[in-house]
Amino acid sequence: MLKLPRGPFEGYIFDCDGTLALSMPIHFRAWQHALKKHEACFEFTWDIFHSLAGLGLHYTVEVLNERFDDILDPDAVLWDQEKFVEEHIHQVKPNEEVVALARKLAAKHPVSVATGNNRKGVHAILEAIGAADIFEIVISQDDVENSKPAPDIFLLAAERMGCAPKRCLVFEDSPSGIQAAQNAGMKYVWVKPQLHGLHEKKKEEEEEEEEGGL
């Protein structure tokens, strides 16, 4: 059950992946697929993925290159990562509680989405979870120069909604997103990460390994 801090608030800003949509396991598998295909020199674990959650996609590859002294081509890796997500987007489910709250708030207040995903990706996710009609204002990484934890994306969302930053409430699941909200002078609600689909995928892989050993 989400607990909202005391307001009053004029506008509400929602992260997409991991907050409105239970899409993080799909993105994790997409990164694993793309990085393996491009022969990354490191193993991409869930802990690494979670530590980078909220960052812009292109910036994520740059951070990985710096962290692991690799020379991955961001454009090539992202092409395969995004293609994998597109092919599996039908598996993405809504975070029912958060989507329902967003729909309720949108009836009386300005609401927006602010995400580190790109413009094409976020609109596809919103369509997949049946939430596209809720949000007229969608801010993606394509719209700002600096990625979370910089406050740029939330400040632009507030501006588009016509609300003062201090009167905005942010819903976020990632550490970098929460830091971005704080940097923007906004209060936030932490949405506990849900790993919908990840355990099912592991079970499928284990079953495939067992079948292969027969």
Image: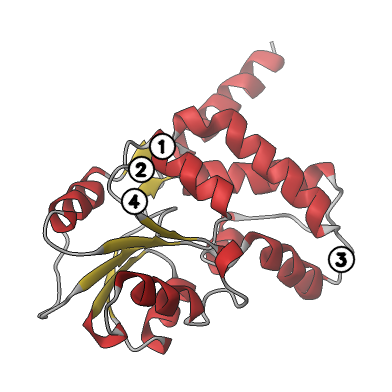
Q: Position of residue 154 (x, y in %)?
A: 41, 75
Image quarter hosting the N terminus: bottom left
The image's mark for residue 132 is 2
Given this view, does label 1 or label 3 mark the residue nearer the observer?
A: 1
Who comes first in sequence, dot 4 or dot 1?
A: 4
Residue 36 placement, left or right of 1? right
Residue extending furthest toward the right: 71
Type of amino acid under label 1: Glu
Who comes first in sequence, dot 4 or dot 2?
A: 4
| Placement of 208 over or under 105, stated as above or below | above
Q: Report the residue marked by disc 4.
A: 20
Do residues under tags 1 and 3 come within 8 Å of each other at their CB atoms? no
Q: Determine the secondary structure under disc 4.
A: loop
Mark 4 to mark 1: distance in Å? Answer: 12 Å
Q: Determine the secondary structure under disc 1.
A: helix
Q: Position of residue 110 (x, y in %)?
A: 23, 64
Mark 4 to mark 2: distance in Å? Answer: 11 Å
Residue 80 placement, left or right of 123? right
Who comes first in sequence, dot 1 or dot 2?
A: 1
Q: Report the residue marked by disc 1.
A: 127
Q: Determine the secondary structure under disc 3.
A: loop
Q: Position of residue 163 (x, y in %)?
A: 27, 78
Do residues under tags 4 and 1 come within 8 Å of each other at their CB atoms? no
How crowded pointer 4 is (Cα within 10 Å; few <14, some 14-19, many 20+) is rated as many
| Placement of 117 over or under 127, stated as above or below | below
Residue 186 appears in which quarter of the rendering?
A: bottom left
Do residues under tags 1 and 2 come within 8 Å of each other at their CB atoms? yes
Type of amino acid under label 3: Asp
Residue 53 placement, left or right of 65? left
How crowded pointer 2 is (Cα within 10 Å; few <14, some 14-19, many 20+) is rated as some
